Image: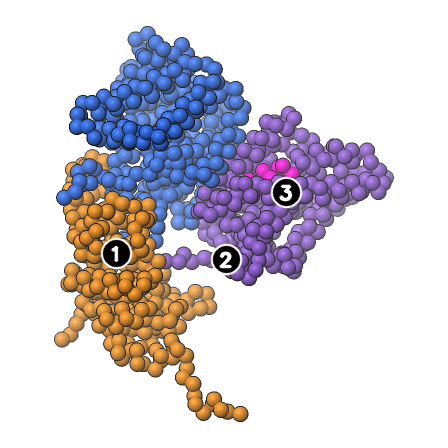
């Protein structure tokens, strides 16, 4: 392990830049072949990583030892993304929107991950809470003219309270039945939306006002780009906040207790954990983030309707959590990127998207139920892991 | 419509629905018992049954046959559909359901959910004009040619065909109950459902029984699908989604793992829906919501169902 | 010398449908003693543990810990008053680290919660560090090797080490009463000997603790315990030292069956 700190950081930056520019090329090239090329390249990298294990281990080590720098650099890259993509990708506006959608789903998936991955509470109606946030925000913005700075948090709170009302009677039920109830609830939510006129029924809510943050109108395009850029930065900040919160929760008593509830609830009870209360709080927090994601979406797109919140969307969120790796916030990000970006490239097969999601879930659960990103032990903090 | 005729109509609707729900619910309960999975693809197997039988009916030209060949063809359609769908069910079980049955039940729930969606979409994409609803051909009309075709009771008009459907359904349910409780195979199924390890030790071929169970369950679903098609005359690619959720809910309400429970659950569910449709304003739109509400209440207060046993968690 | 009773049960009854798993169970646990409980399979030993830790709510009777009636309370309400337990099937979370599995034992004594996890990381790390030291101290007693494996998945450890992690988890909160449910289950003779040493170490480490052990292995009971209860068919059939209980007729009958009556053997 070379001792030169600067060189290690350079390696980290280099790897990140390579991935970054590959992503941009991925966006730029229209043809489906880029997807084939990507899979091939990934295959080659996988092969090389076995053959040149030492080099790859060294690179991984660089990342592990320079976590702060790695994170910092990625953030810089992502902040610059709108402008750099404008230079390289002709359809950058479209891809901006897709990336924002990825951020939104990441936030929702982080919420679900906290419930299902960390605590083992299988919530199959994440789209419904996403929907509660969206409809609450939309309704308040249209009929009460509340600004986004209020509607988005309120959307989150509404989703949390909604979840509370729903889950308090049922969280005592055992895992599988609980999952069933959430499934039934997801159906009931969409059915009700279609029949409730005050939220627009099957037509949904239209003309939801865009975000206007402390006087800055999000419809204005900054620096001659496009007004999506505003939403991009806000979504990115929200995502960072979510990552920070969930990361910290994981590396603390909270994460430990929730993991214990997930893996062996009676043992947790035997250690004095009031498991029902903890599960409820988990549901609250997870639903809050789902609602925030929905509220943001409502403002950005301006129009929401029942088909946005069906079981298919819940399944997408679940796939994201499963694919990346349950209880792993980096995994959730990876899962979101793959599951939102890849289908976009496969416009040829947009029709087949839902079927592929279904198949994907089956395949993941059969072959790799732990997800793509390997499991990492909880270390809390480097200082604690150091030997005495 | 007099009060009595309303009741009769509701009862009839409830029973017709109930038979279909029961046949699907039985599948769920059997799968849960024998493989410890919640098989969400079962509803979509039901849908496949509808499409398979519809295709068979049109290809065999049943409509234009007459006499004994007509009756023979009808019986052949029923048997062939159940056979084909039964085999399809076993294939799905081998490929996708069994591999995930070793983990926690929520995993099989998710996996079969995904499988069901894949099946649903596959039909939509690959069956000619799959996204449209299809009209299911009439099968029985020739049987009653030359008769009035309907009779009246209590102010409600009943078509002979529907009565026939009802009778077929009831007979099948009885045959099923007999099979499970009085035959050797049925005993083997119950043994595996109770305690698979023990059954293995007694010389029961567990894998075979699992295959047989899925075969029977899927075949039953196919039968339910034919009856559904004959009664409602319309099928569509996503009919399995709701049917599956309802079938599972019915099985749970009756008590998962108990055949009689599935039967009771099926009728409880269908009668709740029939009653809501009749008495709640805009009931036919909300009847599913009401029924789900009932299921949720059961899951909260009596998750073992009407006939199920209470289970204590071992510490 | 009058010893304090820290836990006693009054006519505990536990019915499952028509079956009495426990009936008229009156047990006293004195402070600082090492108490054993024996009985054939299905005699209700673990059921009794489950009752006094709140996992089962008794259908009759009461029990009191440190003078407080705890009947009908949930496990989390009971354990926080100073009990801890291990389980017959050694419940630890295989996917979590050794440290994690021990730290969870401090759940009801540690102070930081959501607020600190999010905003006051320093306080959180200090607390974790403090309990980590305690965990290291405990592990050193049982198996110093484990100290190097603090961040290893518990699932990769041999069975006896997993037991030790479980026992450390039960000890780290410094409980007043530790319940050990068949700690030697699944162990061979050598491992059982190590276990008996471990229990001795627990005793010397926690001088004020009371230990209550369920066991099948009579060697463990005879070596380690000071007093024993014997159960059969859910009822207490004997109580006393190991010598007294093992010679008791009812106990022998429970394990070996009725003694053959010599006359009847040749009855026509």
* Pointer 3 residue: B87
Q: Quadrant of the rendered structure where residue C74 is?
A: bottom left
Residue A248 place in picture, x, y as percent: 25, 35
Find residue B204 and report its horizontal and vertical position in percent.
Answer: 57, 58
- The residue at which mark 2 appears reads as B197
Looking at the rendered image, the quarter that the C terminus of chain A falls into is top left
The chain letter corresponding to purple is: B
Residue at the (27%, 80%) spot, across then down: C244
Relative placement, left or right, of C169 versus A27 is left
Q: Mark 2 and mark 1: span between their CA atoms?
A: 31 Å
Q: Mark 2, residues whose alpha carbon is within 10 Å: few (<14), some, or many (≥20)?
A: few
The chain ID associated with circle 1 is C
Chain identifier for the blue-coloured part of the image? A
Q: Residue at 55% across / 49% down in the picture?
A: B31
- Compare residues C118 and A94 and report the one nearer the observer: A94
Does dot 2 land on a helix, a strand or a loop?
helix
Element on which disc 3 rests: helix
Quick check: is A230 in the magenta stretch?
A: no
Point out the image quarter for the N terminus of chain A. top left
Q: Label 1 vs label 3: CA separation? A: 51 Å
Q: Are marks 3 and 2 in contact (CB under 8 Å)?
A: no
Dominant SS type (magenta): helix
- In the image, the chain rendered in orange is C
Magenta-tinted stretch: B40-49
Picture coordinates of residue B111 (x, y %)? 49, 39
Magenta stretch encompasses residue B48: yes
The image quadrant of residue A258 is top left
User: Which residue is at a point 25% across and 23% down the rendered structure image?
Assistant: A11
Give the structural element (helix, strand or loop) at label 1: helix
In the figure, residue B53 lies in which quadrant?
A: top right
The disc at residue C164 is 1
Residue C225 location, x and y as percent?
23, 70
């Amino acid at each position: 392990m070379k001792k030169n700190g600067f060189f290690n950081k350079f390696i980290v930056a280099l790897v990140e830049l390579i991935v970054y520019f590959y992503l941009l090329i991925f966006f730029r090239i229209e043809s489906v072949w880029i997807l084939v090329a990507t899979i091939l390249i990934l295959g080659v990298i996988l092969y090389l990583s076995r053959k040149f294990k030492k080099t790859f281990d060294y690179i991984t080590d660089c990342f592990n030892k320079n976590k702060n720098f790695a994170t910092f650099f990625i953030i810089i890259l992502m902040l610059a993304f709108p402008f750099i993509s404008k230079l390289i990708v002709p359809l950058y506006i479209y891809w901006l929107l897709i990336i924002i959608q990825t951020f939104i789903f990441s936030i929702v998936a982080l919420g679900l991950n906290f419930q299902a991955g960390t605590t083992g509470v299988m919530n199959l109606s994440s789209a419904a809470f996403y929907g509660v946030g969206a409809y609450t925000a939309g309704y308040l913005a249209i009929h009460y003219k509340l600004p986004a700075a209020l509607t988005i948090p309120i959307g989150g709170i509404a989703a949390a309270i909604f979840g509370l009302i729903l889950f308090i009677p049922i969280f005592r039920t055992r895992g599988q039945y609980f999952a069933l109830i959430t499934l039934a609830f997801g159906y009931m939510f969409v059915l009700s939306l279609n029949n409730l006129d005050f939220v627009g029924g099957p037509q949904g809510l239209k003309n939801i006002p865009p975000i206007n943050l402390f006087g800055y109108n999000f419809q204005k395009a900054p620096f001659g780009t496009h007004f999506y850029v505003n939403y991009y930065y806000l979504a990115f900040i929200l995502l960072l906040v979510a990552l920070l919160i969930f990361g910290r929760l994981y590396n603390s008593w909270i994460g430990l207790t929730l993991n214990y509830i997930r893996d062996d609830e009676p043992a947790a009870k035997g250690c004095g954990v009031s498991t029902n209360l903890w599960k409820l709080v988990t549901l609250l927090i997870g639903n809050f983030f789902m609602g925030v994601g929905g509220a943001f979406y409502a403002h950005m797109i301006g129009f929401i309707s029942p088909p946005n919140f069906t079981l298919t969307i819940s399944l997408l969120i679940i796939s994201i959590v499963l694919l990346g790796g349950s209880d792993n916030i980096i995994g959730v990000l990876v899962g979101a990127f793959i599951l939102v970006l890849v289908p976009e490239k496969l416009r040829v097969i947009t029709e087949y998207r839902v079927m592929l999601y279904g198949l994907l879930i089956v395949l993941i659960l059969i072959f790799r139920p732990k997800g793509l990103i390997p499991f990492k032990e909880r270390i809390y903090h480097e200082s604690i892991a150091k030997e005495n | 419509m007099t009060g009595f005729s309303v009741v009769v109509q509701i009862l009839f609707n409830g029973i017709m629905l109930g038979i279909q729900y029961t046949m699907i619910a039985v599948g769920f309960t059997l799968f849960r018992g024998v493989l410890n999975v919640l098989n969400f693809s079962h509803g979509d197997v039901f849908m496949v049954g509808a499409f398979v039988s519809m295709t068979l009916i049109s290809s065999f030209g049943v409509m234009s046959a007459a006499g004994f060949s007509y009756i023979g063809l009808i019986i052949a359609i029923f048997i062939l559909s159940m056979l084909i769908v039964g085999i399809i069910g076993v294939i799905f079980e081998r490929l996708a359901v069994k591999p995930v049955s070793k983990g926690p039940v929520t995993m099989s729930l998710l996996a079969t959910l995904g499988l069901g969606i894949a099946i649903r979409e596959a039909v939509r994409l690959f069956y000619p004009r799959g996204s449209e609803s299809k009209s299911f051909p009439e099968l029985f009309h020739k049987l009653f040619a030359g008769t009035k075709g309907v009779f009246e009771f209590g102010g409600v008009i009943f078509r002979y065909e529907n009565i026939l459907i009802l009778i077929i359904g009831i007979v099948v349910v009885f045959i099923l109950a007999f099979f499970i409780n009085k035959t050797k195979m049925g005993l083997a199924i119950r043994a595996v459902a109770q305690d698979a390890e023990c059954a293995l030790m007694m010389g029961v071929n567990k894998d075979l029984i699992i295959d047989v169970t899925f075969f029977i369950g899927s075949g039953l679903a196919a039968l339910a699908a034919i009856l559904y098609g004959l009664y409602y005359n319309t099928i569509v690619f996503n009919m399995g989604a709701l049917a599956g959720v309802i079938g599972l809910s019915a099985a749970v309400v009756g008590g998962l793992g108990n055949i009689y429970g599935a039967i009771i659950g099926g009728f409880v569910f269908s009668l709740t829906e029939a009653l809501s449709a009749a008495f709640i304003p805009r009931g036919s739109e909300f009847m599913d919501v009401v029924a789900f509400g009932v299921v949720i209440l059961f899951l909260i207060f009596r998750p073992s169902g009407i006939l199920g046993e209470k289970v204590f968690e071992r510490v | 010398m009058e010893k304090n009773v820290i836990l006693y049960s009054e006519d505990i009854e536990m019915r499952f449908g028509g079956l009495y798993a426990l009936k008229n169970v009156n047990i006293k646990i004195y402070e600082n003693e090492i108490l054993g409980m024996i009985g054939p399979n299905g005699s209700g030993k673990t059921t009794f543990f489950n009752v006094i830790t709140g996992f089962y709510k008794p259908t009759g009777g009461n029990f009191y810990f440190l003078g407080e009636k705890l009947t009908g309370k949930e496990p989390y309400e009971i354990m926080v008053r100073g009990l801890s337990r291990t389980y017959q099937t050694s419940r630890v979370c295989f996917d979590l680290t050794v440290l994690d599995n021990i730290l969870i034992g401090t759940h009801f004594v540690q102070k930081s919660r959501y607020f600190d996890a999010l905003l006051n990381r320093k306080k959180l790390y200090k607390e974790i560090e403090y309990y980590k030291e305690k965990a290291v101290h405990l592990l050193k007693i049982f198996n110093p090797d484990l100290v190097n494996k603090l961040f290893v998945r518990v699932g990769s450890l041999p069975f006896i080490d997993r037991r030790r992690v479980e026992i450390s988890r039960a000890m780290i909160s410094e409980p007043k009463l530790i319940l050990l449910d068949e700690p030697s289950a699944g162990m061979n003779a050598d491992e059982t000997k190590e276990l008996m040493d471990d229990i001795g170490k627990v005793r010397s480490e926690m001088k004020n603790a009371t230990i209550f052990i369920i066991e099948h292995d009579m060697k463990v009971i005879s070596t380690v315990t000071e007093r024993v209860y014997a159960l059969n068919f859910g009822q207490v059939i004997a109580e006393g030292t190991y010598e007294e209980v093992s010679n008791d007729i009812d106990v022998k009958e429970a394990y070996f069956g009725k003694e053959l009556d010599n006359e009847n053997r040749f009855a026509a």
